Image (cartoon, rainbow, N blue to C red):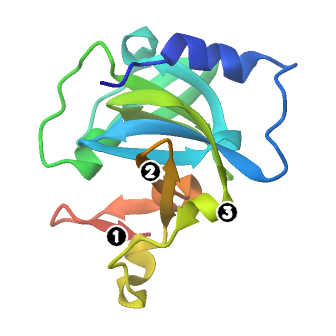
Amino acid sequence: MYSTVSHSAAAVIEQPDAAPAPAAGRQYLTFRLAGMEYALDFSRVQELRPYKSLERFASEGEMINGVAAARGVIMPIVDMRIAFGQRAPMLEEATDVIILKLSSCVMGMVVDGVTDVVTLSAQQIRPIPGLNAGAGEAAAYLLGLGEVGGRRLILVDIDSLMSIRKNAEGALAAG
């Protein structure tokens, strides 16, 4: 069973004196989404917030879960539980929002829960089995599989992932 680390992970993010990652590895924030565990580059994370703590306004769409304000910044909120799952998401106590610093904007990403921060070396990252070159741009956001402490993490390029849009048939497409 994973525990949500919204409050303690937020403290790690906001500590200016936190030790830098070792030169041999890169830090990744891990999170759960549709029964799988993912990881994204920790340097892209601005803040972690419990979903219930955000001041939300504007209309909600299917994947764009409205607009929210956090610390005076207005941002779109994308519900990745809808994008990656075939179920209507339920709001649970562990539901978290990862506030991201993307190359083009600040955006919130709703996930089932944040797990922890891990450091992975290049030797701990492998190509994703069965992902061939024919997958093209639709899978360009998948960086590989990370292995740490017996866990397998799907590493994602969060800028590439957030530039994908959902087409009319409900599938994710590069945009």
Q: Position of residue 65 (x, y in %)?
A: 33, 33
Q: Residue at x 20, y 47 (%)?
A: 85
Quarter-of-image position of residue 173: bottom left
Callouts 2 and 3 close, C-beta under 8 Å = no
Left or right position of 127 against 166: right
Q: Position of residue 10 (x, y in %)?
A: 61, 17
Dot 2: few (<14), some (14–19), or many (≥20) neighbours within 10 Å? many
Disc number placed over residue 122 in the picture, else none: 3
Work out whether mark 1 precedes mark 3 in sequence or the reverse, and give the earlier one: 3
| SS for dot 1 | strand
Tag 1: Cα neighbours inside 10 Å, few (<14), some, or many (≥20)? some
Residue bearing the label numbered 2? 153
Viewer-proximal residue among 156 and 49: 156
For discs 1 and 3, the disc positioned in front in the rendered view: 3
- Amino acid marked by disc 3: Ala
The amino acid beneath tag 1 is Ala
